[in-house]
Amino acid sequence: MRADAVSRAVLEQLRELHCLEPEQTVCCALSGGADSVCLLRCLLELRPVLGITITAVHVNHHLRGAESERDRAFCQQLCAGLGVRLAVYDVNPAARAAQEHCSEELAARECRYAAFAQVQADWIATAHTASDNLETAVHRLVRGASLHGLTAIPPKNGRFLRPLLRVTRRQVEQYLKSLGQTYVTDSTNLTDAYTRNRIRHQVIPALEQLNPSVERTVSYTLRSLRREDDFLHQQAQAAYAKCHTGKNTLSGLETLHEALQFRCIAMLLEEAGISCEAPLLERLAALARQGGRWNLSGAVYAVGKSGTLTIETVQLPEPLPEAIPLQMGENRLFSGFVLHARLETVSPAENVANIHKKFANACLDYDKIKGEIVVENRREGEKIRLVNRDFDSDVRKLVNKSFRLEDRSSAVILKDSQGVVFVEGSGAAERVKIDSETVKILAFTIK
């Protein structure tokens, strides 16, 4: 590609963004690699046409020892020769990665953008190319992404510009060769240690065998997807303003196209500070149609009812701090809940059916209870064999089936020295059931 063709592609990209004004300053993020050196040379070439000032910034990550120092020295020499003011920032991604428990790659990016935030310029230009865009699109496609994610690298984001998105890596190298311009090579780009490198070295060559112009054609595809994504985003904003009928609430979702439903739900989650992925969006869209509740995080739940979706924080009762011995009379266990227990003596003449009718919503054979009876929170893995059952039931599942989420921690569970004897909402254990031999009944009501 001729040098003027590369500069023309950069100029077209910048003019399409409609953001540069004469006398503004554009700072080129300069690593010393081919892409960033190409960007700097193009911007300098276009400086008289655009009427802008060009500066540069280099971030030294200190991750590659002598090679990092070589890159810094190269950038300083290059900018001195071209008459470009250069700012150099030294950062420590290794320390940041250790402190934040993340990868050095992520820490390096965070350090880099923290340095960029200190740059005094109207715009910061980064050297992402059409090749980078293709690699990013493939990477996101493999990992899973929405339409917005598949648009890959945006040409403008905040004050960051990507003027090289219409230029391939091969064209960059040809451009620099035509100028006789040298550059440095990051040795980590030559290995397959990173996913992006494997895509670059293995996947992209395979795609080029199918279509030698894959970088250019995908570049057009991404621009088309970006236009459609922008349109859908505008439509979603209008729909969201209409459906957002209250704090953390969307109403009338059923009137929207499914694509807008998903985007509105994503906006609702973002407003509530909750990250979302495609499976969650599908689940919440179904929840709004069918009704129900879905845990989002901790005590935060999405609640669907009649086409309305609400994000609620459920205030759960405080669980019992410890086992409480059951007393005859009133037992005040939770705020607003009273368990009233009493002992009754029955005559052998009374049959079992009459006993059940006579007493409260729960009754146990007192003489079959082993040791002390207590009220206690359920424990993981606890089982109970209910009356007239020939199998054990999980206490947690019984409680979840009988109670709403906000009421589960206050469900009354009675235990003796051998385990659970009663679960509120489900009944008594087989081993303490009343029968024709029962004399003393422990009866109680829960209000």
Image (cartoon, rainbow, N blue to C red):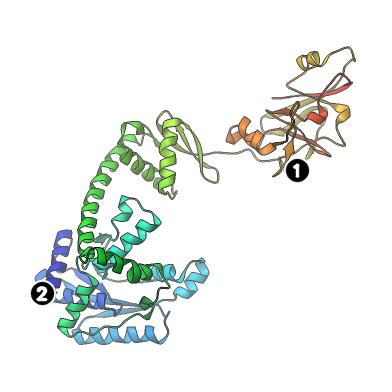
Amino acid type, callout 1: Glu
Q: Which mark is residue 4?
A: 2
Q: Residue at x 66, y 30 (%)?
A: 336
Looking at the image, residue 331 sits to the left or right of residue 366; the answer is left
In this view, the mark in front (2 or 1): 2
Amino acid type, callout 2: Asp
Mark 1 is surrounded, within 10 Å at the Cα level, by few (under 14), some (14 to 19) or many (20 or more) other residues, namely: few
Q: Position of residue 258 (x, y in %)?
A: 33, 38
Q: Which is more N-terminal, label 1 or label 2?
A: 2
Among the 4 quarters of the image, the one containing residue 108: bottom left
Q: Is any atom of residue 161 visible in this view?
A: no
Q: Is residue 275 above or below residue 383?
A: below
Question: Foreground: 35 or 53?
Answer: 35
Q: Which residue position is annotated with label 1?
A: 322
Q: Position of residue 93 (x, y in %)?
A: 44, 73
- Disc 2 to disc 1, C-alpha distance: 79 Å
Q: Are marks 2 and 1 in contact (CB under 8 Å)?
A: no
